[in-house]
Amino acid sequence: MTKLPEKIIDFHVHLFPDSLFDAIWKHFISDYGWDVLYHLYYRECVEHLRKNGIGPIAYSNYAHRKGVAKYLNKWNVNILDEIPDLYCFAAYHPEDEDGPDMAASIIKHPKILGFKLQLLVQCFYPHDERLYPLYDILMENGKWLLIHVGTGPVGTEFTGITHFKKLLRQYPDMRIIIPHMGALEYTEFGALLDDYPNIYLDTAYSFIPQAKNGFLSSSLGIEFLEKYQDRILYGSDFPNLIFPREGEIETLLSLNLSQSFYDKVFWKNGWGIITGH
């Protein structure tokens, strides 16, 4: 009988300063009609996850406008120093004049795994040349880009596989994590794994049993999951969930995949990124 490893790494958590969490939750309700289940601030988030079997936590936040990244990254460094076993994808915005210098400095922090771009919110293209200094810094330091570039839960002119392929033509070897299994273009993003060995996918919001009617619900089958088990990371999207966090884990367990799938997706793959091995 397959089971989860003794320790689990959650590779898709959001942590923000309290005031930004309040603003984000208000935005979800006003723009999408989503009221998240877990109105928890950052220390409460960590405590909740620890009580539910999560060991290392890899979280991210993003700068929704110019001037916010510096504030967020100062906050990130403070909580990374405060909380053990916590790792971060830092914030970046291409309109910040000091962005490249900030990125070059903070990337040296041992608990900074890379940077997060959220194109649905930030509204620029992944191949925007203003991002090239950031990409160069990631390449030079062997760190990761976590980029929400898929069209789920809603698409914009800045998201989608076509724009992402333009980025890959410039940086084919960059280490990249695509959240939500590439939703909603699951097949198209999944097809990239054969040709781009440094692309990983995370599971966040993609195996939710209640998610129907076009919401994030992965169409990738068991054969795909087994074949690419070395390139998939477990992530919850906690705390910004409108369905219970446990549902995704239960769905993945119900698929009765190989034990190596669960060991790798819930632990080994994430630990390899954290440790650089």
Image (spheres, rainbow, N blue to C red):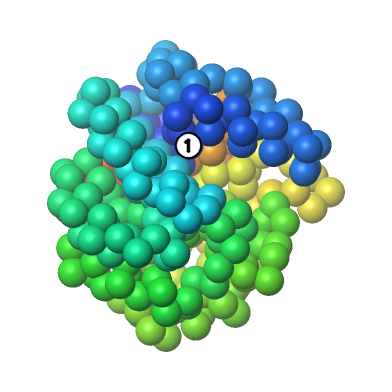
Measured as percent of width and height from the top left, residue 11 is found at 40, 41
Packing grade of label 1 (10 A; few <14, some 14-19, many >=20) is: many
Q: What residue is disc 1 on?
A: 14
Asked if residue 106 lies left or right of residue 28, the reply is left
Amino acid type of disc 1?
Answer: His
**Is 23 in front, or is 42?**
23
Relative to residue 145, is residue 53 depicted above or below? above
Relative to residue 92, is residue 13 depicted above or below? above
Quarter-of-image position of residue 182: bottom right
Farthest-out residue, bottom: 169
Q: Residue at x 32, y 60 (%)?
A: 99
Q: Residue at x 42, y 65 (%)?
A: 94
Would residue 64 be visible to someone looking at this image? Answer: yes
Measured as percent of width and height from the top left, residue 114 is found at 30, 54
**Is 124 in front, or is 45?**
124
Would residue 276 be visible to someone looking at this image? Answer: no
Measured as percent of width and height from the top left, residue 198 is found at 33, 67
Q: Residue at x 39, y 49 (%)?
A: 69
Relative to residue 276, is residue 127 depicted above or below? below
Asked if residue 183 lies left or right of residue 259, the reply is right
Asked if residue 12 lies left or right of residue 99, the reply is right
Measured as percent of width and height from the top left, residue 177 is found at 42, 58
Q: Residue at x 52, y 53 (%)?
A: 65
